[in-house]
Every structure is written in C-alpha cells, then in structure tokens.
Image (cartoon, rainbow, N blue to C red):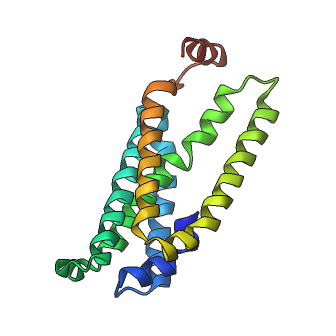
C-alpha cells in the first residue's frame, strides 16, 4: 500500500520521464492481469509454488528499485540512462504481488482455520494486517524524506525474502487437500 499511495512521489524521486498518473494506469493494467491469471493456475501449480514465485519476484524487484535509488543518491552518472527502470520494476513488482501475495494468503486463511475459529482467526489476521499496513504507509513518507528512498525498498526486499523462506518451511501445500489433511500437515510443522 505504501508504494501505491506514494507512487507519484516515487516517480518524482526517480526522475522518470513518464507522468505518475500514466505510470499508475500502466501498473494498474498489470495488476489486473496478475490477479486475473492466478486463479487459472492456482489448482494446477499449487498455492505454495505461486506464493514462493510471488515472494521471489517482489523481493528482487524491491531490491532493484532500492539499488536504483541508491545509485541515484550517490549520483552515479549511468543511472540517468535508465530513468525508465522504476516503471518496469514497479510493473514487475505489482504483477508478482497481485498474482500471489495479494491473493494466496486470503485463500490459505480460509483453508487453514478450522470452522470453529475461522471467523475469529480471519478477523484477527485481517486486523493485524491492516494495522501493519497503516503503520508502514504512515512511516514510509518520513523514511523517504529523512533517510533516503532506497532504505524502505531494501526493507521491503528483506521482508519479502523472509516471506519466501517462511513459505518454504511453514506453509503447507493445500491444493486438493481436505481441511483434515491440511490440519494434519500443520500439526507436523
């Protein structure tokens, strides 16, 4: 959400020649494509694999965007030749995010909670997620102004890298499994 809310500011900092509103329309089209295509592949590929791919794409794209802003900050002369890079990287990020991280956790939430705790568990999960999103979005602008724009993108990269590892070790594949089978898989973790 921080990237979406601060999109025009990110483009301004990047020195992009593409207007922020046009860039957001381009990215919005790719977001729609990512969230439309995923349901087609979710039963074929599996939730865990899609989530891992999504985390990897987000991690690498946020690292690349952070590197771009770092090189801009230290006034690397070659960075001016790739002013188009933030649009491409953000497009890849949102395509990756909307094809996995934006969708799969909601699917898993419905599959992993037993019926007797599903409403409370889902409510708590969504509330905590919303609060963390609010805090990140609130702090994002301050960090960009006070520390530099590359720091939050590297933090986002590390966070999605940790999500990748968490997915590998702690998220069971739920494709084609009943709630009982999923619960037995969770008991093993």
Residue 46 visible in the snapshot:
no
Q: Is residue 133 left or right of residue 89?
A: right
Is residue 166 positioned above or below 86 on the image? above
* Percent position of residue 102, x then y: 55, 50
Residue 94 visible in the snapshot:
yes
Is residue 48 positioned above or below 114 on the image? below
Is residue 148 positioned above or below 126 on the image? below
* Percent position of residue 44, x then y: 43, 32
Q: Residue at x 45, y 55 (%)?
A: 155
Quarter of the image where the C terminus is located: top right
In the image shown, does 4 or 179 lie closer to the viewer? 4
Q: Residue furthest left?
A: 78
In the image shown, does 33 or 137 lie closer to the viewer? 137
Q: Is residue 113 left or right of residue 148?
A: right
Q: Is residue 35 left or right of residue 86?
A: right
* Percent position of residue 21, x then y: 50, 83
Q: Residue at x 25, y 80 (%)?
A: 75
Q: Residue at x 35, y 85 (%)?
A: 15
Is residue 139 positioned above or below 162 on the image? below
* Percent position of residue 73, x then y: 32, 76
Q: Is residue 178 left or right of residue 85?
A: right
Quarter of the image where the N terminus is located: bottom right
Quadrant of the image occupied by residue 5: bottom right
């Amino acid at each position: 959400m921080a990237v979406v809310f601060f999109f025009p500011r990110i483009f301004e900092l990047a020195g992009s020649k593409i207007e922020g509103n046009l860039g957001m329309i381009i990215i919005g089209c790719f977001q729609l494509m990512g969230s439309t295509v995923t349901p087609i592949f979710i039963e074929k590929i599996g939730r865990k694999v899609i989530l891992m791919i999504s985390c990897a794409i987000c991690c690498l794209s946020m690292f690349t965007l952070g590197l771009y802003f770092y090189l801009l900050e230290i006034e690397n002369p070659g960075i001016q030749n790739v002013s188009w890079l933030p649009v491409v990287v953000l497009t890849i990020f949102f395509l990756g995010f909307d094809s996995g991280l934006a969708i799969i956790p909601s699917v898993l939430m419905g599959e992993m909670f037993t019926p007797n705790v599903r409403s409370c568990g889902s409510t708590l999960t969504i509330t905590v997620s919303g609060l963390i999103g609010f805090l990140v979005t609130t702090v994002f602008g301050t960090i960009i102004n006070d520390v530099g724009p590359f720091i939050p993108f590297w933090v986002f990269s590390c966070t999605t890298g940790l999500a990748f590892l968490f997915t590998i070790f702690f998220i069971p594949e739920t494709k084609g499994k009943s709630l009982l089978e999923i619960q037995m898989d969770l008991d093993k973790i």
